[in-house]
């Protein structure tokens, strides 16, 4: 033990342990102290180092090594530290007591900066444009939710139809490799203006809002797609045609409308009215999961077609 200590001393120290102002109550080994060091003069290492710093203790040499930006090693009883390849002199020998190392308060300003963990390397390259970094991001907005049921007809609540189709659409879009976010993934109320906000906050590439229609006579059927602004016009046209084809249903065409969910979106945005719940036959189809999947497939394939055309 002793020869190891002195071996280490030879490599570590330039100044011998020869302080006249020695720490209190040293044990015979100069390593372990039998009573708690005076907290007015001594500071526990555990109290001054960042939690990310890993401590290892070599039982053979009794040395403490701290894994910081560079390795910092102390040997109890000695007033030097090794910091990487440097030797750093301390005003007092460090002390070992009750499982931790104690250093003189005077030395804390020297020791603390050495305990910093390596800072994250700074990126010198400018950030890549978002489109080059990640997948196409589609926000799906199932209309209504929570206390806002949307239309009620033929035993159906519009909010339920909307979320079912949205979930099917999410699955299909993810299978195509797109990233998908829903404005609501369960039955909850969302303010109208929060819906385009979701898309804007995550810098979505597309916003697709899903609704179902209702009217008094019960005779009207078919789908229609709303858009707001010329940017979304072609997008709406392709979605509308694709949904009509997949669902084999009457197309009522696209309509320009200053709907809030579309107007405030920063990306191409459409609102698909997937059918009339007020028509008995169409209501039955809208409640059928297979039909919902066909509607979703129409939207998903329409989006893929629009993207491939505009690449
Ligand atoms: Zn609606």
Image (cartoon, helix red, strand yellow):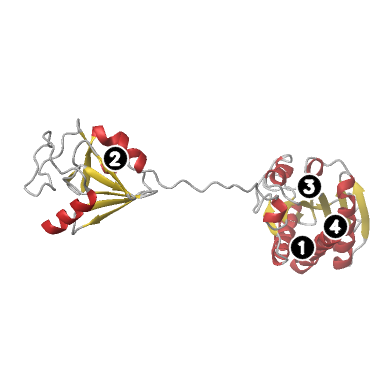
As measured in the structure, the alpha-carbon distance from the residue carrying label 3 to the one carrying label 2 is 51 Å
Q: Classify residue 249 by image quadrant.
A: bottom right
| In the displayed structure image, the side of residue 7 where residue 49 appears, left or right | right
Is disc 3 placed on a helix, strand or loop? loop
> First in sequence: mark 3 or mark 4?
3
In the drawing, what numbered circle is on residue 267? 3
In the drawing, what numbered circle is on residue 47? 2
In the drawing, what numbered circle is on residue 90? none
Residue 116 at x, y percent in the picture: 39, 43
Residue at image point 74% right, 43% down: 196
> First in sequence: mark 1 or mark 3?
3
Task: Check the image and report above or below for 182 versus 38.
Answer: below
Is disc 2 placed on a helix, strand or loop? helix
As measured in the structure, the alpha-carbon distance from the residue carrying label 1 to the one carrying label 3 is 30 Å
Residue 72 at x, y percent in the picture: 31, 48
Q: Relative to the observer, which residue lies in front, 243 or 188?
A: 243
As measured in the structure, the alpha-carbon distance from the residue carrying label 3 to the one carrying label 4 is 14 Å
Residues marked 1 and 2 touching at CB (< 8 Å): no
Q: Classify residue 94 by image quadrant.
A: top left
Where does label 1 land, which residue? 287
Residues marked 3 and 2 touching at CB (< 8 Å): no
Residue 137 at x, y percent in the picture: 71, 54
């Amino acid at each position: 033990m002793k020869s190891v200590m002195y071996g280490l001393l030879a490599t570590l120290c330039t100044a011998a342990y020869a302080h006249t102002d020695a720490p209190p109550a040293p044990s015979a080994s100069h390593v372990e102290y039998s009573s708690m060091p005076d907290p007015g003069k001594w500071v526990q290492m555990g109290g001054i180092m960042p939690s990310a710093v890993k401590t290892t203790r070599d039982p053979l040499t009794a040395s403490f090594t701290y894994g910081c930006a560079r390795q910092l090693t102390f040997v109890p009883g000695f007033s030097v530290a090794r910091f990487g390849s440097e030797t750093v002199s301390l005003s007092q020998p460090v002390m070992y007591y009750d499982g931790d190392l104690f250093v003189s308060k005077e030395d804390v300003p020297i020791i603390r900066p050495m305990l910093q963990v390596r800072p994250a390397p700074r990126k010198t390259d400018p950030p890549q444009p978002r489109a080059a970094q990640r997948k196409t991001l589609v926000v799906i907005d199932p209309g209504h939710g929570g206390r806002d049921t949307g239309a009620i007809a033929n035993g159906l609540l519009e909010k339920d139809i909307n979320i079912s189709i949205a979930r099917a659409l999410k699955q299909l879009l993810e299978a195509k490799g797109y990233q998908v976010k829903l404005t609501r993934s369960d039955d909850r109320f969302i303010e109208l203006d929060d819906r385009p906000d979701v898309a804007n906050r995550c810098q979505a590439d597309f916003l697709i809002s899903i609704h179902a229609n209702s009217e008094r006579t019960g005779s009207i059927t078919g789908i229609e797609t709303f858009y707001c602004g010329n940017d979304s016009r072609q997008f709406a046209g392709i979605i509308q045609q694709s949904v009509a084809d997949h669902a084999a249903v009457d197309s009522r065409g696209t309509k320009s409308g200053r709907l809030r969910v579309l107007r405030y979106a920063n990306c191409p945005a459409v609102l698909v009215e997937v059918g009339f719940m007020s028509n008995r036959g169409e209501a039955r189809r809208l409640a059928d999961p297979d039909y919902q999947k066909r509607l979703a497939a129409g939207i998903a394939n329409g989006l893929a077609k629009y993207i491939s055309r505009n690449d």
